[in-house]
Image (cartoon, rainbow, N blue to C red):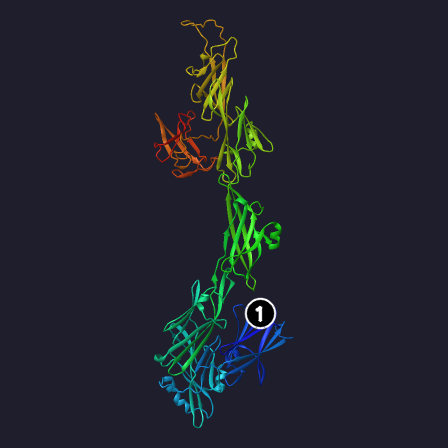
Amino acid sequence: PPGFVETSCHSRIFWMKLNKFLLQGKFFQLEINDPYAGPVLLDEKLASRCGYVLSEDVWGNPVFRASVLGCHVANEADELFSLTVNIKVSSFSSMRAAVTYTYPMYCSYSSWASREIVCEENYMEVSVRTDVPAVSNDYTVAWMSALPETQNVAYQLWQLMFVSPSGRKRITVSDAAKLGYSFNNTLSRVYLRAPYHSNESDISVVSGVNMNMVTSTSMYRQRWLLLLIDTTVSCPVDGISFTGTTLTWTVPSVIPTLVVQESTFLSKNILMGVDGRVIVNPEEKNYLLEHNETQIRITIPIGAEGGKLKSSISDGVYGVIYSIDLFLEHTWTDADWQTTKYTVIKPITTPFMPQIPTVINNTLPEERLFNVAFGHFLPDVSLVAIAIGNVPFTLREAQHHGFKVYETPFSNRTKGFILEVSFDDPYVLKEYVNRNETKYTLLVNYTISVGPEMTPYYHSAEVECVIADIELPEAVGYCDEENLYLAIPTFGLHQYWNLYLGNKPLNRHVVLANGYLAATNSTHLILQIPLFAVAVIYEEVSFQKIKARFDVTLRKVRTMETLKMFSVSCNFNSSAFIICHPDGTIMVSAQMKTIPAIDMSKTKLRDSSCKPREYNEGHAFFKFHVTTCGTSVRFEGDHIIYENEISYEKESLPGQSIPTITRDPDYRLTVLCYYRAKETVVLGAFASDPSTSPSFGSGRMVPRSNIAVYRRTRQALNVVSRVSKDESFMEFYEPNMAILKQLVEPVFLEVELKDESPDTELHLENCWVTGSLDFNSTPRWNITVDG
């Protein structure tokens, strides 16, 4: 077929390249068409003995090379050479129903050097002109050891004598062929072809390069003629080194086994080539060809023109391999051989070089769009599937869903894959962070197909973008004559944040239990809080007015971090009330409801020294603590009840035992305050200048256990303080253990009087916070003072 076969002749080697695309899905064999014996099937053993190479170039095209001195080559006067190859192609591995294509190849080569050496992939070949003087003037040990053996050479018969560290071996040409060698002569030349690493070969190190060497002498005798021809050959077997960016091939400049008189050595010409073609100006392709007295070095940048980068997978890791087919031709002269042409053909492949793909985040926050580039890959890689948030998509399904997936070219002849996903896509993870930001997370799993083998490779990536796209709600507060109101936007409620009353979520149960009313419309939650409901804070109380405040905390759903405090504060006019503070303070506004009226300034509590703080004609205002003014205490169920009484002192005449008759009526008002026996009370201390003072609630706190902190005569009280881990007061921190608390995070304190005396009571007098372990250090924030 057209374009199936490409043939050429480089130097003294036939080259044939087959088009891999025309062989896809097919099997092929090569036959060498002998002009006398017919076709001979090419196999590995025949190839190395007969001067054939069947391999692939870096692009995967099958390549066949043959020496012009190879088997079955028609030779005309050592100048014109021809070889016919049969290419059998079949769709079956058994090669049945094969189609045979016959291709003749021709090569013209007349510029033979006195000695030519070819170092191929699978064989070494040396050919010499037979008119060259047979024996060197410098009789080396190898030559001298060969002379006694010549007396035993059969009449008019070629024999080979090998010299190796194990000794000398003299064999006939036919026996040498059984060992993988090939020896013959043409009109003007004698050649020996040897496999690498045969039993007769030896390894020597020359200028840091391991050389495989076969030292041999070819012997021929007639009646009046004895020929001794040096057919020694030596070829490099390594000399390759790699860095992360280059490969270097090193070949010795002078090979002692090939140049007996090194003082006469003169390098005449050094050429390098790629893929069988000479590179006249290597520097134009960024190749570096350099040489000195000991070495010839060719340095190739990895990825350079002429070679091929190939993607590969090793142990689940993506990487690349670079291959290039090099050859080196070195021509020199010396006193023994006049001219030697030394050719080395070297396919080089780098080791696996891991190249972890990179994920480039080109996300566009202003467009709320993830733009993720995944690369860099060679052209032999294709994207076959993705998974977003562990949901698999083929590329077609991804496009149908609304994702955009497309290729993009990168520098250095690489490419990448672009994925675009909207922030609002349901498969994008969303997390509320900080105060007003959302963290969008895109979890991607890529499935790519690598190389012609279509090896699957998987890579996962996580891309995040945080943007301030959440607006914290602003509450509106107002009041009427008897209630406080808070109108709070419902956006984000229960999704991003919750409302808290103290440390308890403000849910339906709390609203009902505390006597609040809650209503919602399309945009807001409206809370109605009666003036004297639970959790109302009384900032200022007198018989003329009450300044009341109600606070609700906005906290994150997940972390319970406090974001905002919503407060409504109003002044109320109230004629009569009783307020029982959590710290035990009782405030009472008593209204006169007697006929005739009484003087409110003369009202008192049980302790007659406890008079009104304020009064007028119709009201008297008292403020006292449950531990003063004759207040009594009793327990009923799970409540502690404190009781006192407001009464009116009737006037009496001085010095008389019987009171005078008076129109003053009796006035008695019982005051009761109910407290839960077990209740968590929230108290706080506030710095006067938050910008300069340490954040209250953040620091280290060490609880202490004190025994006999307060002594009376012949009595010691056992008082223990502890810090609970939560409001259940079931689990406590160890004594003297440092505890770290964050801002506005509650601290649960318990002070217990371990005394069995029924007449003993415990009152919390002072509670404060300091910035260090020294209780007397400053600054100091008071929580309770004097009870």
Where does the image place residue 623, in percent across and percent down from the top left? 45, 20
Q: Is residue 532 visible?
A: yes
Q: Residue at the right extreme?
A: 97
Residue 255 visible from this viewpoint = no
Q: Quadrant of the N terminus?
A: bottom right
User: Residue 276: x, y in percent?
Assistant: 50, 73
Image coords of residue 511 (percent x, y): 56, 30
Camera-nearest residue between 666 and 168: 168
Look at the numbered disc 1 and give the secondary structure of its residue: helix
Q: Is residue 490 above or below residue 190?
A: above
Q: Quadrant of the C terminus?
A: top left
Near mark 1 (Cα within 10 A), the count class, few <14, some 14-19 or many ≥20, is some
- Number of marks: 1
The residue that label 1 is drawn on is 20
When the figure is inspected, residue 7 is found, relative to residue 542, above or below; the finding is below
Task: Tell me the quarter of the picture where residue 700 sits.
Answer: top left
Considering every residue shown, the one lying at the far bottom of the view is: 223
Q: Callout 1, which amino acid? A: Lys
Front-most of 698 and 420? Answer: 420
Answer left or right for 6 relative to 255.
right
Residue 629's spot in the image, x, y percent? 43, 18
Q: Nearer the viewer, residue 151 or 502?
A: 151
Left or right: residue 754 versus residue 385 is: left
Q: Would residue 531 be found to the left or right of residue 715 on screen?
A: right
